[in-house]
Image (spheres, grey):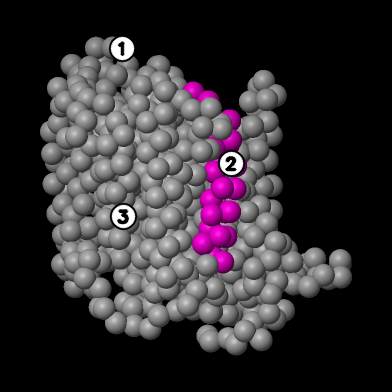
Amino acid sequence: MPVSPESRGREFTARSVITGMVLGGGLSLCNLYTGLKVGWGLSMSITAALMAFGFWKVMAFGFRTRGLTIYETNLAQTAASSGAAISSAGLVAPIPALTMLTGQTLAWAPLTAWVFSVCLVGIVVAFGIRRQMLVVDKLPFPSGLATGETLKEIYAMGSGAMARVWMLTGGAVIATVIKLSEHLASIPRWPLPWQLTPRAGGALEKAGHTSITFGNLSLAIEPTVLMYAVGALIGVRVGVSLLVGSVLAWGVLAPWAFNNGWALPGAMDPSRSWYNQGLQWLLWPGVAMMVTSAVTSFGFSWRSVANAFRGSGKGGAESDGDLATPAARTWFLTALVIVMALSVALQVAFFAIAAWMAALGVLLTFLLALVAARVSGETNVTPVGAMGKVTQLGFAILAPGMPAANLMAANVTGGAASQCADLMHDLKTGHMIGARPGYQYIAQTCGALAGSIAGSAAYLILVPDPKTQLLTDQWPAPAAASWKAVAEIFMKGIDALPTGAMQGMVIGGLVGIVLAVLEKMLPKGVRIWVPSPASLGLAFVIPAYNSFSMFIGAAIAWALSRWVPNWSTRFLIVFASGLIAGESLTGVGLAIEQIFGGK
């Protein structure tokens, strides 16, 4: 979409960047909330674009101002997306895992500085690889492509674009009302009305338990809309995989572990969840399945990995924001030295990591970011799990028995690599519409700062005591559980595992490998019937009612896409995103109110 300088209109303006920072700070809370619930963040690019466009469109009606140009909306969306992605910089995985293992916590200011430094490394790396990925190799970056097409569409549709904005707003309002009603009326989840009889002579019977209810096993239906909306976005294959995994884990393996004494049961109360007790054993086969499937799937991307270091060597140069110009190369090298020095200094100061080891971790980031961005650009899947586990393994060898080095040096490499890959999608959007990349880097930095400030504050307020609050019904935190489990193995050895967990890990790991191979090797028409191994593993480490809700949401979305395809194409993703934003922000607000209200 080439645009002449005379006709491009306003692009870098204070209102576009400030709008993006405000949205990024708010959306960072959504991804923090969702990440602590299900372990992953959601792309907020299209949501942010619609929110920025809609806000200034409404302002133009009543306050004699002009709406945003497409370039201003792109900058606002870029800043907001960068802020929303702050969860991948460590707030839902290595940071809480470190606290659970060692008790170390950071106050708000140092935590903000740490998270922002991780983001800066990812942003600078994105600057260095942008031209190769977008201009030379012309990678699709599907999420960025979808956002770019959305921007073109809403600026071509006129009044029709506002329909999406109102659908997004309507979803947020509905979710807010439901969440407030659920809170004020104390609506409980509804356990399935069945129970199991403990095995004769088993550990449960010896402990005096006469039954295991489905409520004990978290086999229930929950009224919250967040998980239904997430299910609508993840697709029916993942939804079915979560359902199968939850039944296998909590309906079969958990009772088996309780009966064998491998996991200790909770209180003899038919309505009390034993999620935390069952997780102590189910965590290990679940994490093994997620790790081996992620690494195996990543192995099938070897061509992308090879291409990341090879490149095509051709393509045109751009004058703004590319390494093709001397000024840009100077800027890049200067920024590279600054962010590397900052990251090393913070690792030494906050976590007592040796300076040489910290520097090695930052240098490793550039290698992994190149790989992660290439894979994400070709497949739309950022291999966050694989990146994190590779770096944890590396630092387990370099610093055995040191959880801070294992987790936080890996936080830089894995977090910055995933940040870089995610931000490349926004740069793809800008490239599609002819935006200046230099402005996007500034917007990304401002957005990351806003997200770091808001996300760090919300994290400390929501989970002031990760040791007791996380890995619970309220905050399952599966990503933190995975990082913690891997660090524990490297720190304590396999002898520290619960009885039977090693066998469970071996079986879970093999299942992850086999399913990952099948979903890559089988014909396209057949592979849709292969369960997603990452989703199966996830179902082991979150309550079954979360998996049930996501399955129901995925099934509803699948049905709507067939019954009302036109409506679904235009509004389904937007409406689900509104539901997620509405419940997440309301949930964060209620949690803060409860903490400061002393309830």
Q: Who's the residue at 15% across and 67% down the image?
A: 521
Picture disc at residue 179 = none
Q: Is residue 433 visible?
A: yes
- The residue that label 1 is drawn on is 208
Left or right: where 243 falls relative to 81: left
Quarter containing the C terminus: top right
Q: Earlier in the sequence, mark 3 or mark 1?
A: 1
Residue 470 vertical placement versus 148 (above, below): above
Q: In percent of the image, x 61 and y 39: which residue is there?
A: 588
Q: Is residue 537 visible?
A: no
Name the element at disc 3: helix
Q: Position of residue 333 (x, y in %)?
A: 39, 58
x and y, in percent, of residue 269 in the image: 44, 19
Instruction: Report crowding for label 1: few under 14, some 14 to 19, many 20 or more residues within 10 A (C-alpha).
Output: few
**Range of the magenta residues?**
439-465
Residue at 57%, 60% in the rendered image: 443
The residue under label 2 is: 453
Number of marks in picture: 3
